[in-house]
Amino acid sequence: MSRKMVAILLVLGLILSMTVGCGGGDSTTGGGGKTTYVNIATGGTSGTYYPLGGAIAKIYNDNLEGVNANAQSTGASVENIGLVAKGETEIAFVQSDITYYAYEGIENFADSGKVENIRGMAMLYPEVVQVVANANSGIKTIEDLKGKKVAVGAPGSGTEANARQILGVHGITYDDLAKADYLSFGEAADQLKDGHIDAAFVTAGLPTAALVEVSQSNDIVVVAMDQAKLDALIAEYPFYTGVTIPGGTYKGNDEDVLAAAVMAMLVVPEDLDEDLVYDMTKSLFEYRQVIIDTHDRGNDIKLETALEGMPIELHPGAAKYYEEAGVK
C-alpha cells in the first residue's frame, strides 16, 4: 500500500472517530467512546430541586454508559421552562402549575405565548406552598398578611404565582400589603432572619433547608390555610391539592398545618433522543434509593404515582418505559 493511500485511510479513520451521533445533549468522542452531556436545571442552592438534581445526576453518571450528567443551579420553574424550550438543558425541575401555564400560554406566559415543545418525564412529589412568618409579627392567618412586608417569590417564579393566587382567594392583592418583596428562597430566609420582612411564601418540598435554617435562629410561625379557602383555591385552580405540613417539620411548630401544594415534575425537550429519555426514566426509578439517601422527598418519588396529574403530553421515551412497567 502506498504512503498516499495510508495517509488517506488515516484521515478517514480520524473523521469517523470524531463523528457524533444524534440525540441527547452535546456529545463528544474520546478514548472511551461517545459522551452524552445531560444538564439538569434545578433551582436555588437552598431549595429542594438542587440536591435532588445532584442525586439524579449521580444515578445517571453511575449507571448510564457514556452519560455525563450535571445539576445546575437556576432561577427554578419559569427559567427552567425557557431553558428546555430553547434546548439549553436536557432535564428540568418545574412546578406542575408552571408547566401547565407554559403549555397553555397563560399566566406567566400570557405575553410570550405557548411553549409547546416541552414534554413530561415524571411527576415527583408535592411542592407545598408554605407561608412562614416571624412569631413577633403577630401573623396567625393569611388575612393577617394585610399591612405586612411579605416576600412573594422571585419575579416571574412559580412561588410568586402561588402567592398571588392564594392571596386572591382571601380577597387580598399586593396593594393590601405594606410591601411585596420579590425574593428568592435564600433571600427571603435572610430577610426573615434579619427582621426586614414579616413573612414569606416559599413553594418547595418539605422540609425546605432555607426555612430549617431560619427556624434555628428565629421563632417562626407556619401559617395554616382555612379548609374553605383551600377548597375555593382548588376549585379555581385545579392543579392545586391540599396537604398537611406535619408538626415538627420546623422547630417550634408542633401542630399539623393545612396547606396548598402543586407537584414537582421533570420536563424534557420534545426532540430529546427517545432512547436516552427511556434510559433516564427507567434508572430514575430503579435507583431511587440514591435520591432517598440524599433528601427525604425521595420517599415521595414513586413509580405508581409518576403519572398522577401530568399536565402535558409525555415524552415518547418516558411513555415507553411506563407502558413496560404497567403504569397508567
Image: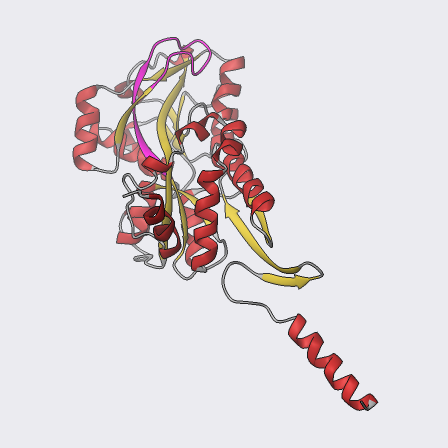
At horizontal 33% and vertical 13% (from top left) the residue drawn is 256
Apparent side of residue 32 relative to residue 143 in the rendered image (left or right): right
Vertical order, 102 against 58 (above or below):
below
Magenta includes 300?
no
Residue 325 position, x and y percent, is 35, 44
Q: Nearer the viewer, residue 269 or 3?
A: 3
Residue 140 appearing in the image: yes
Q: Nearer the viewer, residue 31 or 55?
A: 31
Residue 203 position, x and y percent, is 39, 31
Residue 122 found in image quarter:
top left
Q: Nearer the viewer, residue 294 or 128?
A: 294
At horizontal 45% and vertical 34% (from top left) the residue drawn is 183
Residue 215 position, x and y percent, is 49, 15
Q: Residue furthest front?
A: 1
Q: Residue furthest right?
A: 3
> Which quarter of the rendered picture does the N terminus lie within?
bottom right
* Magenta stretch bounds: 245-264
Residue 72 appearing in the image: no
The chosen color scheme is secondary structure
Numbered marks: total = 0
Vertical order, 237 against 32 (above or below):
above
Q: Nearer the viewer, residue 169 or 275?
A: 275
Residue 135 found in image quarter:
top left
> Which quarter of the rendered picture does the C terminus lie within?
top left
Magenta includes 249?
yes
At horizontal 55% and vertical 67% (from top left) the residue drawn is 21
Residue 56 position, x and y percent, is 52, 40
